[in-house]
Image (cartoon, rainbow, N blue to C red):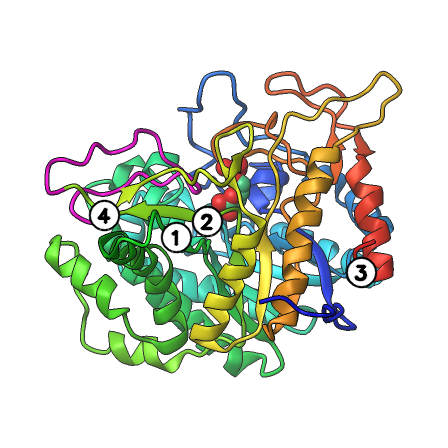
């Protein structure tokens, strides 16, 4: 639909930016922090760094927050590392870890920046992984206790909470990217773990509402609308199946407290359905999110499967490169879309479609917690960083947010990935996303100094105007 005039961004729109704890902080064992599954990883793709130093935000926190203030952020979405707060995942609380996030949150509030806190972003405590990870129901209780600690500590300062980052990506690609619960637990079905994470999420949402009635909480999956390759009815069905398996499974449980029927049928048919214990349904049904946060990078495109055994799976998928599944759908490239340097498609209009689909299904306010362009940024001899390709990407996506708002979708804010350069989930630090450049290479830590990219000044002006120029 087209409009004579677009609706302006509302007053108080949360123009923000995002990071996650393990990808930005470094200080992986500082001040009593315990190891998480990402800290103990050794199998990094050739030539890419681990997470021990990352962007060293742990030691640059005041400088970084000052830069976020200068950028004019209204919100900063970050994650708390479970192992800073509870080093072994389920035991004593580490006061120094608690203090670090007070310092961060207080710094943000002093700059007028709303903290948006993710409780868990891929960094399961290694001690819990050694006791069965998400396959062990005890991890649900450990997460609930950790969440209660966060609410008791930060509940008076933080309004916006996110439960689990990209649970759907952990289930679909977690083993490949080593972000679910480590190599120790590969024998247990990812959908049993998923069920336990859904219970952990529901428990945390309900507990937050009891402990901090003014707080607002939402799930934070990666939602990418799936197009059919063509209007051939079989392609449309395949896209509908992949939408149910990739997207709606997670949001239906989070919002309605019950499994999506098509996704459930898929799980049963494939022998993947989790064991649901008495009482689980009531836990899922009792929790109600206040909003939906979602990460969006691009849509996917699906075609009808060729037939059991005939589908050649695409090798090496990730969050944005789907692999297809024999008998369910074939993953195909969308010929109408360009790709970034890492093979991820770029689809701003699909962003608007994704907003509309989510809003029509769930009728809850939407907060974008990730969207952005990974690229190999170059520093010019005078120290400037001309990331006009990133500005283009962000501009095109922000335009589509305004179209979605004009469509009547309630959009709370936009937190692109990432506030500052950080380490990718599987492609190192050279795949940069930030408004702020961090001077380090994969192996060479260099100065770890910070500089503002061109996108920093562009976003600063946009936030000030509360509008696209
Ligand atoms: C999302 C994750 C982030 C982040 C981002 C970019 O899936 O929530 O943690 O890293 O994608 O992906 P990548 O780091 O693989 O480039």
Task: Check the picture and name the quadrant holding the N terminus.
Answer: bottom right
Which of 140 and 376 lies nearest the eye of the viewer?
376
Quarter of the image holding residue 369?
bottom right
Q: Circle 2: is it few (<14), some (14-19), or many (20+) Cα within 10 Å?
A: many
Can you identify the residue that label 2 sits on? 299
Q: Secondary structure at mark 3?
A: loop
Disc number lying in front (3 or 4): 4
Counting residues from the start of the chain, the first of labels 4 and 1 encountered is 1
- Label 1: few (<14), some or many (≥20) within 10 Å? many
Marks 2 & 1, CB-CB < 8 Å contact: yes
Q: Relative to the observer, which residue lies in front, 307 or 245?
A: 307
| Residue underneath mark 4 | 304
Going from N to C along the chain, the mark reached first, 2 or 1, is: 1
N-term-proximal mark, 3 vs 4? 4
* Residue pointed to by mark 3: 467
Circle 4 SS class: loop
């Amino acid at each position: 639909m087209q409009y004579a005039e677009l609706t302006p961004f509302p007053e108080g729109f949360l123009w923000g930016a995002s990071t996650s704890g393990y990808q930005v902080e470094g200080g992986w064992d500082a001040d009593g922090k315990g190891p998480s599954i990402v800290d103990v990883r050794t199998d990094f793709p050739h030539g890419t760094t681990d997470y021990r130093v990352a962007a060293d935000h742990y030691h640059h926190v005041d400088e970084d927050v000052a830069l976020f203030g200068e950028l004019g952020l209204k919100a900063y979405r970050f994650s708390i590392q479970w192992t800073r707060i509870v080093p072994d995942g389920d035991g004593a609380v580490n006061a120094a870890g608690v203090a670090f996030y007070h310092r961060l949150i207080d710094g943000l509030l002093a700059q007028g920046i709303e903290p948006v806190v993710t409780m868990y972003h891929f960094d399961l405590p290694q001690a819990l992984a050694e006791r069965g990870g998400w396959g062990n129901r005890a991890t649900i209780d450990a997460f609930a206790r950790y969440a209660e600690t966060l609410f008791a500590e930060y509940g008076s300062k933080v309004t916006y909470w996110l439960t689990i980052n990209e649970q759907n990506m952990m289930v679909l690609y977690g083993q490949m990217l080593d972000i679910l619960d480590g190599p120790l637990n590969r024998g247990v079905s990812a959908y049993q773990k998923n069920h336990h994470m859904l219970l952990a999420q529901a428990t945390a949402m309900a507990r937050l509402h009891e402990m901090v009635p003014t707080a607002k909480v939402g799930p934070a999956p990666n939602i990418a609308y799936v197009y059919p390759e063509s209007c051939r009815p079989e392609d449309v069905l395949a896209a509908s199946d992949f939408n149910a398996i990739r997207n709606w499974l997670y949001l239906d449980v989070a919002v309605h407290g019950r499994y999506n029927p098509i996704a459930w049928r898929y799980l049963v048919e494939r022998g993947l359905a989790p064991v649901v214990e008495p009482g689980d349904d009531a836990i899922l049904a009792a929790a109600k999110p206040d909003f939906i946060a979602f990460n969006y990078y691009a849509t996917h495109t699906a075609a009808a499967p060729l037939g059991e055994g005939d589908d050649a799976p695409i090798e090496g998928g990730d969050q944005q490169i789907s692999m297809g599944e024999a008998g369910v759908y074939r993953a195909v490239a969308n010929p109408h879309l360009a790709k970034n340097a890492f093979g991820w498609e770029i689809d701003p209009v699909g962003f608007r479609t994704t907003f509309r689909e989510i809003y029509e299904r769930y009728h809850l306010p939407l907060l974008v917690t990730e969207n952005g362009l990974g690229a190999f940024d170059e520093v010019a001899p005078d120290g400037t960083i001309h990331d006009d390709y990133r500005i283009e990407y962000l501009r095109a996506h922000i335009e589509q947010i305004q179209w979605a708002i004009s469509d009547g979708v309630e959009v709370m804010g936009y937190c692109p990935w990432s506030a500052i350069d950080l380490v990718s989930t599987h492609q190192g630090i050279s795949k940069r996303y930030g408004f702020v450049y961090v001077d380090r290479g994969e192996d060479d830590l260099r100065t770890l100094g910070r500089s503002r990219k061109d996108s920093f000044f562009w976003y600063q002006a946009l936030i000030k105007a509360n509008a696209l120029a």
